Image (cartoon, rainbow, N blue to C red):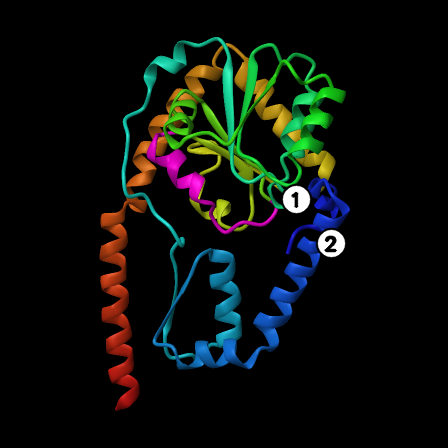
Amino acid sequence: MIPPKLWKAAFSVKGAIALLLKGVLNKIQSTTNLRVHRAIKDSDVVVCATTEWQNYVEKLAGKKHHSKILYRPENCINRTYPINYSKFNSKTIDLVFVGWIDSRKALVLILDALKRMKDTSKVSLHILGDGDLIEKYKAYTSINGLDSVVNWHGRVPREEVFEIMNNSHLMVLPSLMDANTTVIWEAMAMGIPTLALDHFGFHDTIKNGETGFLIKPNNYRQVVNDIASVLIKLQQSNGMSLLRSMAENVLENRKKYLWEEREKFFESVYTEAINNHKNRGK
């Protein structure tokens, strides 16, 4: 569930209601739906996309459940790239957002953080994608004097997405409700650290202060202030050095999310499931 004090970040009353209903219905379904309970009961291994869901399913299953309940993100990295070290010679911190621009993505949190900063001369935000709220966001950007900071690229060919991302220093993904978006794996593949809210899948895949920045999702003002503080910190003299160090940490951390590792994991899962099934049959 999304923290109630963050509903403003949906940037749309309709979107906020939709997210609220989705969260409530998911909770009700997972708790009361007999098919969910039967699936867990009859399983030999359960794999959850986040540790939050892993803990929740463990509670649903109970201590006497016969199978293992494991965690693994729903996606992984199938191709890697070297770090573009030339970008660290820049005097501007390039942020990049990639995705569908709707209530779930909460892009307003980044815009309000930029608005909160006294000096944005050394920050540039690149937004790649389209969506239901794009025109409303563009108007909001202009009204708040951020036109010189925000670059709207719209939908662009994949090659151009790669080029812009590869020249960026920090991915920003302030999603209100996501397990792990595909773009976080693409960022990892290029050695790009990520800023996100400390919940759902981001809590598991980003190491705060090492491979990115995790912002506690307590309330709207606090989130905006914390994001602004990170950006202000990165504008300081050692900011680019910190981003370079983080990029190198991402390269090391991404090893456990490579496709080869995922193959080994699922081989072990199938072995575990077969053994559990055999033991249950005795």
Q: Which residue is mark 2?
A: 17
Badge 1 element: helix
Q: Residue at x 49, y 68 (%)?
A: 57
Work out whether residue 67 can be spotted.
Answer: yes
Image quadrant holding the N terminus, namely bottom right
- Side of 243 relative to 85 (left or right): right
Q: Is residue 84 left or right of residue 21?
A: left
- Neighbour tally class for label 2: few under 14, some 14-19, many 20 plus, Cα within 10 Å: some
- Residue at the extreme bottom of the image, as rendered: 282
- The one of 11 and 241 positioned closer to us in this rendering: 11
Marks counted in the figure total: 2
Q: Read off the magenta span.
A: 176-192
**Residue 59 magenta:** no
Mark closer to the chain start, 1 or 2? 2
Q: CA distance from mark 1 to mark 2?
A: 10 Å
- Note whether 222 is above or below 16 in the view shown: above
List x then y, in percent, for residue 163. 38, 23
From this viewpoint, is residue 64 visible? no
Looking at the picture, tell me which residue is in the foreground, 218 or 19. 19
Which residue: 36% across, 33% down?
250
Q: Is residue 161 above or below residue 17?
A: above
Q: Which mark is residue 103?
A: 1
Give x and y (percent) for residue 3.
68, 50
Q: Is residue 270 above or below residue 133?
A: below
Determine which quarter of the picture holds residue 192. top left
Quadrant where the C terminus sits is: bottom left
Residue occupying image coordinates x 67% and y 33%:
108
| Quarter of image, res 89 | top left
Label 2 secondary element: helix
Query: Which residue sits at x=33%, y=17%?
Result: 85
